[in-house]
Amino acid sequence: MRYADVVDVIEEKLPIIAAYTELNENPNQRQRLGHLAEDFIMPLFEKAGYIVVAKDTRFFRGRLWPRRTDLDFIVYGEEENRWYGVQIKNSLDYPEWDDIAELIDICNFLKIVPWLIARICPKDYAWELIQCGGFVTLFWERRWLLTKENKEIAEKIARKTAIKVTTMDKLDEFAKNLTKDLGKIHKLEVRQKS
């Protein structure tokens, strides 16, 4: 295509791209969106049959992870009699490999199963987690969870780009589908670590 054919589309999308890039890359906003996802998902664990035993911790059964990284949650699945160390990633871009590696390391140290719950994750990172005896649950439709305050930009993102978003005032379907996906982990066997 010629530039003249797409210049109007480019000019229309540039402010939207700038706005969501700012949301995703601003450390304060990024942290806020991470906490938003954690607060949203915490009650879904109970609905899916898990018990949340700790939040923002690196301590479990007398063992203290020596680095500063905390797990977002430690949850227990009574049905399968299994403990999970959970990290939640609610960002536009892929999680960093270092975050995945640290999730695996901290869970190995605490002797619990690593579980990543994220908007999106590269297949090779997901496979590495599975190979290490862990699990990955992706957000329903790979939606990015945004605050009510971001409703205007969320609507523009949804209308003008391929990125799916959900704001906190439109969570029913998102919650229902994510709860169902969380519940699927009960039935899965832990892959034996090699």
Image (cartoon, rainbow, N blue to C red):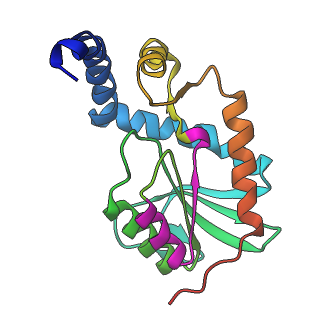
Q: Residue furthest left?
A: 3
In this view, 172 is above or below 40? above
Using the image as rendered, state which of residue 11 and residue 191 is in the foreground.
Answer: 11
Residue 43 point in image, percent of width and height:
71, 43
Q: Hey, which quadrant is residue 17 in on the image?
A: top left
50 horizontally vs 83: left or right? right
Q: Is residue 126 magenta?
A: yes
Q: How many marks?
A: 0
Residue 11 point in image, percent of width and height:
23, 12
Using the image as rendered, state which of residue 105 and residue 128 is in the foreground.
Answer: 128
The span shown in magenta is 123-141
Identify which residue is drawn at 79% across, 46% down. 47
Identify which residue is drawn at 50% across, 24% down. 147
Identify which residue is drawn at 41% across, 66% down. 124
In this view, 182 is above or below 35? below
Residue 193 point in image, percent of width and height:
54, 86
5 horizontally vs 155: left or right? left
Q: Is residue 132 magenta?
A: yes
Q: Residue furthest front?
A: 1
Residue 138 point in image, percent of width and height:
56, 50
Identify which residue is drawn at 74% across, 59% down. 184
Q: Residue furthest right?
A: 79
Image quarter in which the N terminus is found: top left
